[in-house]
């Protein structure tokens, strides 16, 4: 495709996107397609001739749009909000259009240095000290892997340079609650620890916050058995209920094991994937009080702030430790600038990277932090409002504190004898009403298990979600259960 | 940013990109900036107010463009060609604009199913059998990690579910030549094998192809010592010299160890990151003869085919094995479609993903495979032509066979007594002439070490690189050394 062909098609696509976003509220939220339906609309064999742009654009309307769940719809209250901001779409388009390649500083100095600057801007915006330096990983899953790798190496005296985990004499152990994201256990598997060496630390039954006494006991038991505590993952805003692990108390436990940076002290990784965005609000920073004593922190501007994927920030206080564990230095990537510059290939898993920082740079500059703060405060207010409604409504109950913008709820209908429904009947009821709402396409909520039982998450924060949308989903929730009972 | 603001700014940015690409030949190839220079042009503190789009666009010209090495310049012969095609830029723009989220089939059925279809189209285009199913990883580095993880688990009877690598009784071993990509050793480190358990298999001194007898001996020695061969990484087109490991002979070695799919047989991962693109040419498929017996294959349309990053294809014959090793199934991602659909989160490391397939879908449909074949044949012809010129020119020598589109060369000047320059003087000379070319901004070549000595890679394949550009770089190479000697 020539630049002139690109120009013509690009203008059409920009208009298509603007129209799509402007009309998003007219679409169903949940994709109304069956398994295999999208695939069946496409040819089994690759094209043989070039197709006109009009055909491809038409297929966005015919095949793609009906096949995606509209997570940018203001009535989408599922999972977590993400991947939205049009300002960041432009930044990523610039990245693609320039076609730069990040494999060394020399291959694209601006790619490296804009990322350094933007990570430092975000550091300031969330109130972290100058001790922290950051990079952009694709997702918090990958950040968790990187954190556990550097933890593994610190605790094993850099076993990767010798026999790896296959040679360690004291098994290394990882600690988290069962409220931590699924990627934490996956990361421990990937890093080779083995599930037998992942401890499930107890949590408070209501707040679902990690119990530091349980952490302390668990670590003591492992030490007594000759094992080595390698990493603690603390969650600030879990996926289930936005629970907040108590960092100061966790740090107290770690302080007793060894000084900052020592191999005897487990690496503390703070997974603030969702809640980190809220740290742009000074009044919310108490949520991660104690974070300065962590070894690594991740949070995702591609969630609530709405920067498009992949924008997971990963901060450490000791980047040389990252480099020691993850560096490669093949001759064809060496240059005279080495030693004076950052080589981001040594801060993560992949060698090559896009110009990832442009989307966040555009987003922060074009929308501005104050607008982001305003939107987050709007969502926090909406969540508090919804929680009040639920609290005041007979038959409805909050199942977790509302620490952020996600409201976790059950409807408890009365049975024939007037007692509240329990057990399998309640499980089926919960799954039924949320499925009815989701299948209708009018709104989307997430069913999720908490303490082994189904509940429903109403996660507020889509860019277009105003208070009236939250009121509408609350009406829909009540009318849906009314139609069932 | 509203859809209407996006429309206005988007049109400007499309024009900017079209103009940038149309004028790319007027720019220096190597970025002419010093370490820290880009950073110094940006504010230390984040913006407080939204900025007009014109300011941000102006900064692309003021800060970004001078700070990137112009890898899309027709005189760029460095590393490998990559990340170019404007048709794929449009596909990725559509992905960003739609703002879909890939965390489960339900969250975006089209995201999953278009990826299935496009991976199958590419399978057909490179001539793989129906036995293979594919997914898009970000890079071949990540694909190597995934391959070594599944290899590790197959060889250790799924140790991740128990004590991990910390509990294996027979150390697991990985085999590759020292010509394999740096990401292979990094992947082995990440997966916890430890460098002591990575064997450097010998290679042919001229072709740099793996010596299967050496592989056989190395495996036999490990078996005799009670270790367990877990994985062999074969390269089809190495980064240094595009060397090709002999798959049929490697497969013969593996066949003696255990039947296909068994835990006694090391996992064979084929890293065809660069050369895989050439498999769209039927006349080149002999390069990976034997590939059907591999366990996994990766190649990067984001390299020579020019699809933009991140587009690394990863194929396996047994996806259930991937799922067993990498699956997570939290309650909030479960749906009634489970069991009937593909969950790509279980085929790789991250949970969440962009709509990755759109860029490849757009690229294949808008440019068409025949145009891609034509471009690759042009580049192969140019490389063969350049190799002939070098072969015929006194004082110049090819240092490796030209198996693809990369020509590896040294200039060997005569010294005062008429003998060819050797040793440190030759090392300095090679680094000098390539540095002079690169610093000039007129062209870019990669200096790389081969058998411990510097040589220069002339890697042909940028979309805009015609024969006259190759002739021009050859003139520049000769005039540069003439000015030095």
Image (spheres, coloured by chain):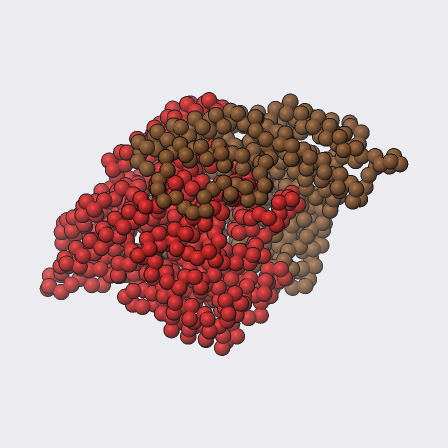
Chain colours: A red, B brown
Position in image of residue B169 (x %, y %): 58, 66
Residue drawn at x 14%, y 57% as measured from the top left: A393
Query: Residue A47, relative to residue B264: is it above or below?
Result: above
Q: Quadrant of residue B447?
A: top right
Residue drawn at x 32%, y 64% as measured from the top left: A208
Q: Quadrant of the C terminus of chain B?
A: top right
Position in image of residue A252 (x %, y %): 42, 71
Position in image of residue B84 (x %, y %): 52, 32
Q: Nearer the viewer, residue B348 or A117?
A: A117
Left or right side of B5 for B420: right
Q: Nearer the viewer, residue A442 or A21?
A: A21
For residue B353, say whether it is visible: no
Query: Residue A72, relative to residue B461: is it above or below?
Result: below
Residue drawn at x 62%, y 36% as measured from the top left: B78
Q: Residue furthest left?
A: A417
Position in image of residue A87 (x %, y %): 37, 38
């Amino acid at each position: 495709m020539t630049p002139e062909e690109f120009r013509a098609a690009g203008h059409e696509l920009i208009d298509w996107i603007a129209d799509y976003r402007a009309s998003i509220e007219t679409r169903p939220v949940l994709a109304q397609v069956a398994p295999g339906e999208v695939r069946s609309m496409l040819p089994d064999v690759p094209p043989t001739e070039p197709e006109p742009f009009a055909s491809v654009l038409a297929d966005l309307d015919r095949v793609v749009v009906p096949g995606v769940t509209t997570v940018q719809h203001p009535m989408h209250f599922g999972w977590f909000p993400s991947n939205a901001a049009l300002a960041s779409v432009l930044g990523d388009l610039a990245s693609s259009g320039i076609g730069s390649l990040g494999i060394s500083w020399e291959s694209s100095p601006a790619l490296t240095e804009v990322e350094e600057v933007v990570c430092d801007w975000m550091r300031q915006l969330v109130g972290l000290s100058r001790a922290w330096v950051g990079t952009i990983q694709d997702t918090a899953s990958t950040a968790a892997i990187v954190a556990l790798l550097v933890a593994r190496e610190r605790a094993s005296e850099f076993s990767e340079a010798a026999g790896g985990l296959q040679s360690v004499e004291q098994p290394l152990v990882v600690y988290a609650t069962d409220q931590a994201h699924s990627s934490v256990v996956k990361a421990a598997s990937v890093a080779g620890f083995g599930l037998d060496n992942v401890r499930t630390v107890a949590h408070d039954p209501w707040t679902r916050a990690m119990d530091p006494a349980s952490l302390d006991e668990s670590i003591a038991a492992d030490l007594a058995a000759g094992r080595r505590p390698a990493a603690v993952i603390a969650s600030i805003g879990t996926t289930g209920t936005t629970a907040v692990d108590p960092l100061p108390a966790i740090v107290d436990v770690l302080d007793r094991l060894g000084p900052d940076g020592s191999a005897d002290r487990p690496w503390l990784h703070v997974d603030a994937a969702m809640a980190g965005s809220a740290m742009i609000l000074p009044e919310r920073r108490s949520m991660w009080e104690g974070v300065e004593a962590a070894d690594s922190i991740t949070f995702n501007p591609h969630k609530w702030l709405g920067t498009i994927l992949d924008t997971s920030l990963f901060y450490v206080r000791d980047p040389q430790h990252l480099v020691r564990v993850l560096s490669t230095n093949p001759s064809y990537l060496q240059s005279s600038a080495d030693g004076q510059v950052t080589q981001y290939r040594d801060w993560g898993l992949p060698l090559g990277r896009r110009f990832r920082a442009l989307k966040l740079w555009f987003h922060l500059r074009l929308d501005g932090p104050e607008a982001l703060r305003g939107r987050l405060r709007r969502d926090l207010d909406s969540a508090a409002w919804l929680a009040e409604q639920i609290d005041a409504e007979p038959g409805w109950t909050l199942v977790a504190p509302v620490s952020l913008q996600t409201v976790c709820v059950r409807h408890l209908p009365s049975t024939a004898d007037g007692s509240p429904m329990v057990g399998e009947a309640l499980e089926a009821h919960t799954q039924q009403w949320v499925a009815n709402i989701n299948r209708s396409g009018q709104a989307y909520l997430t069913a999720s298990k908490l303490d082994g039982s189904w509940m429903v998450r109403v996660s507020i924060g889509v860019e277009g979600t105003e208070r009236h949308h939250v009121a509408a989903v609350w009406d829909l929730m009540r009318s849906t259960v009314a139609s069932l009972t």
